Image (cartoon, grey):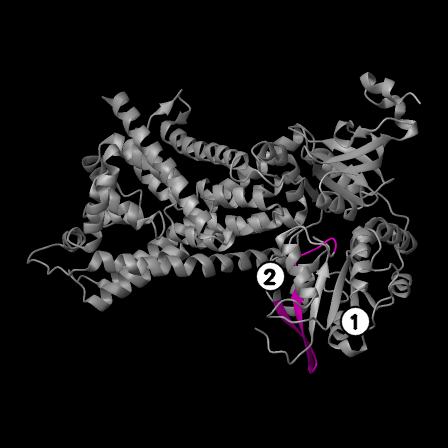
Amino acid sequence: MLAMLSLEQVEAGHVVRIVRLAGSQSFVERMKELGLVYDTVVEVVRRSPLGRTIQLRYGTSHIALRLSRNHMIGVEPLHQQIASVQPERALDYVV
Amino acid sequence: MQARSIPHVALVGVPNSGKTTLFNSLTGQRKKVANYPGVTVEPSVGIVRQHASAIALVDLPGVYSLSPKSTDEEITLRVLEGADPHLGSPDGVLLILDATNLEKGLLLFSQLASLGKPMLVALTMIDEVKRRSAMLDDIQLEATLGVKVIPIVGVKGIGITELRSELVNIEHWRTPFVHVPPDATIEDRISWARLVAAQVLREVHLDERSERIDRIVLHPLWGMVVFVLIMALIFQSIFTWAQPVMDWIDYGFSQLRAWMVGDAIAPPLWLDFLANGIVAGVGSVLVFAPQIFVLMVLVTILEDSGYLARAAFFVDAILGSFGLQGRSFIPLLSSYACAIPGILSARMIPSHAERMATILVAPLMTCSARLPVYTLLIAAFVPPVLVGGVISLQALVLGGLYLAAAVVGLCVAWLLRKTVLSSDRTPFFLEFPPYRVPHWRNVVVRAYGRMQDFFQTAGTVILALSVVLWALASFPRVEPQPMMSADHYRRMQLEQSYAAKLGKAIAPVFAPMHFDWQVTLGIIGSFAAREVFVSVMGQLYAVGGDDPSNLGLQHALQRQLQPPVAFAVLAFYMFALQCMSTIAVLRRETGSWRWTAFAFAYMLVLAYGAAALTYNITSALLS
């Protein structure tokens, strides 16, 4: 089992898999409609230099996303990516 | 309202799927389009003709699904369900599928199919797919969906004729296959959409060109440089390219008035009404046209090229910390030309609270109508010295006024979102369209359409109010004395008019900053458009001209006003919502008199406070 991260914690350039959506019903629905459903693999292409907005790539989609505090997209790093997750969190990924 | 003699077809697609471009080329109607999600805001109906047949096409706001999450998405659902009282139930659905974004479009298709209405699919962006050397099998797609699929390239008109023939041939449309049961989850629909997309679209490559551009445009450093350059270009264009045209229009209208009145000291009432009521009113509406057009052309180019979504990504973080979001950027930017197009474009913000906060602070951005007032007072009261030998103090003051208003606007937005608009914490998301070269016809047609929006909403209000103000300033009539000059007569007429009485009645309110009744009258006149202040001063001080660079007017003001009063007037104009057409648009867009009254009241408090403060500080400094 890999520990779940919030999408916002993922560093730019890393590829992750969506495992959980949490928040209001309309938020969860909208994210799913955008194709961010369970098991979708997304890349955090870059983070806004000034704040919490991130750019995601998945399939043929590119979106900018900024989550508010009461919404969460839970992700797991893909296996081959484990090595490159933030070092201070690496312990969390021990199987 | 359309008579129900011809079939109605609802035009549906996900946001930014090329829907409005297609609508334009099918109906020839001038409607805005953009390479920026969320541009269609209310259903507009156009007629598609081919030979003797015709259908009515209803352009609907883009939706991702049939469970709406914003007001414009609700419009689409209402029309599709036949619940719109004006449009009734549509006879068929024209779905736009963006070939570069098939998955989301197919998800929408799976829900539309459950409506059981005859359907036609227009497949757009096929040129974009070819450019990325992917293979698109539209025949397979047609077989899977069960309805006719017509590939098109909207801007080039490819496939449009075929689409038009199919459109008017509505009795031969098929009803789509229902692949996913109506009660299926979104996950089921997405899986189906992904499966179909994978079957019809092969060898999908990354859009290398967009990736390359993004690496520069979204780079932390170079991105900022690009952003600042583009913003500088926009402001430059508003002030240096549009200004000369505005000056010509202004000059043209004042010449026309002078010619109409001739050398009569006191023109007959009807002529006075035509020249100083109607012609002056039309002039003060038209003078905004060049600036709004230039701004709209540039904004449209930014939208269509795909840059705007990136700029929104860039500024979202900043605007987000003030309780706004990336989409608030265009409304706020447009408000530098005029708050009205700014407030109208706030409709693209899905979150109610963020949209309201954007609308409520948009009038604080320094619109172009304030500029003549600023120019006049700064030229008259700020010494033309250089600061540090480089930059003129006058330019510095002007820049300071712009900057301070923007900062205050953001702080007000933050405050609103912490208090009365605190609910509704929605996430911000915006799709990045691929970069495309804007099509000039699209750009011009759309900028023109937006200018029409301005004339329709603001023009009538400004014109009506100009006439009211003319009447207030022209009655009761005063007979000219012998040997009186025309300027002198106009001054006397104004001084004894109802307008002057009104100014004198209100002036005590402004006692803390020592505004006399003349300045008060200028402020009242500004309700038509703020730059009217300049012409009111011109008349009151009998120097004629309504040109802020008029030296006679500047000298008259220097004699009449204490410098602290002049600075207090500047502070007042920075914040006050003294523009009737903005008030009218606020009422319409917020749908509430309470919010409108709130906006007026809070800006009045700000303006009043700032003016009083400025008066006291500057009198202390200058004494």
Question: What distance separates the C-alpha of mark 2 from that of mark 1?
Answer: 26 Å
Magenta range is: B45-65
Q: Which image quadrant: the C terminus of chain A?
A: top right
Q: Which image quadrant: the N terminus of chain A?
A: top right
Number of marks present in the image shown = 2
Relative to residue B240, is residue B195 drawn left or right? right
**Residue B256 shows in the view:** no
Amino acid type of the residue that numbered disc 1 sits on in the rendered structure: Pro
Residue B617 vs B316, above or below: the answer is above
Amino acid type of the residue that numbered disc 2 sits on in the rendered structure: Lys
Query: Residue B546: x percent and y percent?
Result: 28, 49
Mark 1 nearby-residue class (10 Å; few <14, some 14–19, many ≥20): many
Residue B48 vs B59, above or below: the answer is below
Relative to residue B2, is residue B149 drawn left or right? right
Kind of element beneath mark 2: loop
Q: Residue at x 78, y 27 (%)?
A: A11
Q: Earlier in the sequence, mark 2 or mark 1?
A: 2
Residue B493 vs B142, above or below: the answer is above
Relative to residue B89, is residue B400 drawn left or right? left
Mark 2 nearby-residue class (10 Å; few <14, some 14–19, many ≥20): many
**Between B611 and B130, which is closer to the camera in this rendering?**
B611
**Residue A17 shows in the view:** yes
Q: Residue at x 69, y 35 (%)?
A: A67
Q: Residue at x 87, y 39 (%)?
A: A39
Look at mark 1 in the image and give the residue it sits on. B118
Look at mark 2 in the image and give the residue it sits on. B31
Kind of element beneath mark 1: loop
Query: Residue B70: x percent and y percent?
Result: 64, 51
In magenta segment, residue B609: no
Nearer to us: label 2 or label 1? 1
**Between B414 and B487, which is closer to the camera in this rendering?**
B414
Relative to residue B103, is residue B37 drawn left or right? left
